[in-house]
Image (cartoon, rainbow, N blue to C red):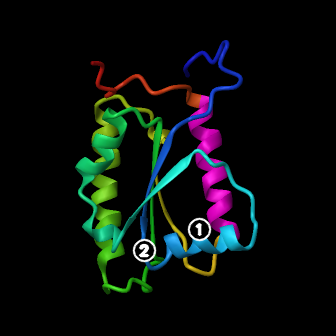
Amino acid sequence: MTENKGQENWVPKIVGIVCNWCTYAGADLAGISRIQYPPNVRLIRVPCTGRINPFYVMKALQEGADGVLVSGCHPGECHYLTGNLSARRKFYMLSNFLSYIGLEKDRVMFTWCSAAEGERFAKVVKGVTERVKALGPASKLVKHL
């Protein structure tokens, strides 16, 4: 675990790559319901998590994100039928690869969140933020100029 000495006020940068139809709508519901969650997550809306290239996650980490959240429709609810199942397979392979190269597994998370789960979205974001904050700033994969 990374030593967090002197980093009490440090806030992790988290990229969220989310499904337009479910998770993004869940985030919107959290917002209009005034459910508080950490503002350090920057959402990237995609039509379907099944279309996410695993290199997008790698690129986010390389460009300085401390953590990445990928979230889509629950199984059986995908607007593109099986896109979320494809995303789950890709994420499983990506998480094995990231573990192989020595990246902490809590830096990258995959979850399901429907449009009606604004409160769940807020809890997921809080959880990801806490897990990444406990690890400290990312240093592996980060491109230094």
Image coordinates of residue 111 in percent, x first then y, are 49, 62
Name the image quarter holding the N terminus: top right
Vertical side of 122 occupied by 30: above or below? below
Q: Main secondary structure of the magenta part?
A: helix
Image coordinates of residue 50 in percent, x first then y, are 29, 70
Image coordinates of residue 62 in percent, x first then y, are 31, 33
Q: Label 1 sits on what residue type?
A: Ala
Cα separation, mark 1 vs mark 2, equals: 10 Å
Vertical side of 144 occupied by 115: above or below? below
Residue range (magenta): 119-134
Q: Which quadrant of the view contains residue 72?
A: bottom left
Residue visible at 63% across and 18% down in the picture: 4
At label 1, counting other C-alpha atoms closer than 10 Å, the crowd grade (few under 14, some 14-19, many 20 or more) is many
Residue 86 included in the magenta stretch of the image? no
At label 2, counting other C-alpha atoms closer than 10 Å, the crowd grade (few under 14, some 14-19, many 20 or more) is many
Residue under label 1, please give it. Answer: 27
Residue under label 2, please give it. Answer: 20
Q: Label 2 sits on what residue type?
A: Asn
